């Protein structure tokens, strides 16, 4: 066992939250030691090389108004690539319900379209997003934690029912490929309002005509460049198993047997992982309950190369939004030419991702490929499996992102980020004013400020 002292702050987790906290603390004059379980930084920002392009398994899209992310890129000299021309093509996808392939143009008059009359022209993948903007009670994203809006912390199902959707309509509007939870009864409408309010707010500070960016050769270059700015670097392969907070210092234990001691700890672990870390004394009351009960979304991505442009043969869009095992089967456009499809990713969410993750890999691939080929005979033999990433099965992530069930935001949303003795928490699940990578950065900044102000 080795015992390390000398740092002012130990930061656990070298994702964007931990790295941003570490940088702010270092700039505030603290000596910071970052501990990371993996052998690389970035966490849920993870870029892979595939077929000469970078393929993102995690955070990809940087809203043009993500001020913290764009500022850090400017600081470390990472040039952002404007993806606005690519995004236009993401609207081109067809719908698959119950094995039937439906063109967007057929949807408004299609017998399966059970949306109320005013919503019939909306596609299932964007109706709830449009309504979350139009029907949003939040004047600003940060107000989602204001008790004044707690009455909106109801299920997405009851919110949509209030807008006139029946049970079948809710199923098509939300449950086909849910970003949060397994179905509309499982997630708070207030979370969708927060996401929508942030999406609108960040666009206000975006340059004219630019919707978003990504990073050439991989978004993972951002956390890598942030880590390079740290005087003490990052200690890799340090899986933290326990944190004890005492009167004068906190102690962090690793699976390796090493023990790190410092006056303060920033814990930037994903919530699903944090549940398995022993914290002494145990966080009580609402923050303890939040830790035990906040859910993480299982998401599996399966990557495919195409041997030919099968969509030219059948005349449908390359991408499909399906209610089957292939989930959202999306054409990736990671090259210079926005028109060029570079590969495909099947995004499988929620309960379907859990089922898929329980299968042996070969069976999972067969199920997904079989589902694509049965609705798209033109794709038969044209897709080659490249690999997959199951975020729910990753022991360092235990899910792609956290989500709040109905009632949870009002109950512990505002208090769950409170420090516990000498431990300060941050991470994607504790973002208060922003979402995605931007919210993650904000949470790290907040944790650093808490310590600096002491
Ligand atoms: C599939 C997917 C797509 C996404 N797309 C977007 C997008 O397009 N735009 C956007 O803005 N956001 C997106 N996000 C969200 C964004 O990537 C995350 O919110 C953000 O990267 C989370 O950062 P974090 O620092 O909170 O957590 P993480 O990045 O998970 O960092 C936590 C770190 O802790 C480490 N760790 C885990 N266990 C231990 C342990 N026991 N001891 C020590 N270290 C440990 C992990 O290895 C990791 O490095 C996406 C996420 C996913 C998964």
Image (cartoon, rainbow, N blue to C red):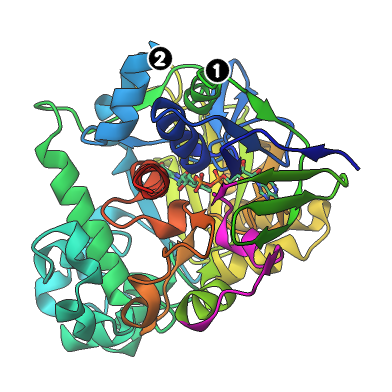
* Marks 1 and 2, the one that precedes in the sequence: 2
User: In the rendered image, is residue 365 in sight?
Assistant: no
Tell me how far mark 1 sits from mark 2, CA to CA: 9 Å
| Crowd class of label 2 (few under 14; some 14 to 19; many from 20; radius 10 Å) | some
**What residue is shown with label 2?**
76
Magenta stretch holds residue 58: no
Q: SS at mark 1? A: helix
- Residue 176 sits above or below residue 314 on the image: below
User: In the rendered image, is residue 427 in sight?
Assistant: yes
Residue at 45% across, 59% down: 429
Residue toward you, 172 or 68: 68
Residue 31 drawn at (x, y percent): 55, 29
Magenta stretch holds residue 268: yes
**What residue is shown with label 1?**
228
Tell me where the magenta segment starts and ends, as one range: 263-285
Residue at 62% across, 39% down: 303
| Crowd class of label 1 (few under 14; some 14 to 19; many from 20; radius 10 Å) | few
Q: Residue furthest right?
A: 1
Contact (Cβ within 8 Å) of mark 1 with mark 2: yes
The N terminus - image quarter: top right
Q: Is mark 1 within 8 Å of ligand 1?
A: no
Residue 302 drawn at (x, y percent): 63, 45
Residue 177 drawn at (x, y percent): 45, 64
Residue toward you, 333 or 205: 205
Residue at 15% across, 61% down: 133
């Amino acid at each position: 066992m080795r015992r390390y002292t000398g740092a002012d702050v130990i930061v656990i987790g070298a994702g964007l939250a931990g790295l941003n906290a570490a940088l702010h603390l270092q700039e505030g004059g603290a000596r910071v030691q970052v501990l990371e379980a993996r052998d690389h930084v970035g966490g849920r920002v993870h870029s892979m090389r595939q077929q000469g392009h970078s393929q993102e398994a995690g955070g990809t899209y940087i809203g043009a108004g993500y001020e913290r992310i764009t500022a850090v890129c400017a600081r470390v000299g990472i040039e952002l690539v404007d993806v606005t021309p690519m995004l236009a093509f993401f609207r081109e996808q067809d719908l698959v319900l119950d094995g039937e392939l439906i063109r967007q143009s057929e949807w408004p008059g299609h017998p399966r379209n059970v949306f109320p009359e005013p919503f019939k022209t909306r596609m299932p993948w964007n109706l709830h997003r449009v309504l979350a903007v139009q029907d949003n009670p939040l004047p600003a994203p940060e107000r989602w934690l204001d008790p004044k809006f707690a009455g909106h912390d109801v299920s997405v199902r009851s919110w949509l029912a209030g807008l006139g959707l029946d049970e079948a309509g809710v199923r098509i509007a939300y449950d086909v490929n849910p970003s949060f939870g397994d179905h509309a009864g499982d997630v708070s409408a207030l979370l969708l309002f927060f996401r929508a309010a942030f999406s609108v707010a960040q666009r206000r500070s975006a340059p004219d005509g630019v919707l978003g960016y990504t990073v050439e050769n991989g978004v993972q270059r951002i956390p890598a460049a942030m880590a390079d700015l740290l005087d003490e670097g990052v200690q890799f392969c340090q899986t933290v198993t326990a944190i004890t907070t005492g009167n004068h210092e906190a102690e962090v234990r690793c699976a390796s047997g090493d023990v790190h001691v410092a006056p303060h700890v920033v814990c930037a672990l994903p919530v699903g992982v944090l549940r398995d870390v022993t914290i002494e004394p145990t966080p009580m009351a609402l923050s303890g309950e939040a830790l035990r009960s906040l859910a993480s979304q299982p998401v599996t991505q399966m990557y495919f190369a195409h041997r030919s442009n099968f969509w030219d043969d059948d005349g449908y869009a390359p991408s499909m939004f399906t209610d089957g095992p292939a989930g959202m089967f999306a054409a990736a456009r990671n090259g210079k030419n926005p028109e060029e499809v570079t590969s495909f990713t099947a995004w499988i969410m929620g309960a379907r991702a859990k089922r898929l993750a329980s299968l042996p890999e070969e069976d999972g691939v067969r199920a997904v490929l079989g589902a694509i080929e049965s609705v798209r005979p033109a794709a038969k033999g044209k897709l080659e499996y490249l690999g997959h990433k199951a975020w729910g099965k990753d022991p360092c992530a235990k899910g792609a992102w956290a989500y709040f069930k109905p009632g949870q935001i009002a109950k512990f949303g505002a208090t769950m980020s409170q420090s516990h003795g000498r431990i300060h928490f941050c991470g994607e699940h504790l973002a208060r004013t922003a979402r995605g990578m931007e919210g993650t950065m904000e949470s790290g900044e907040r944790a650093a400020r808490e310590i600096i102000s002491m």
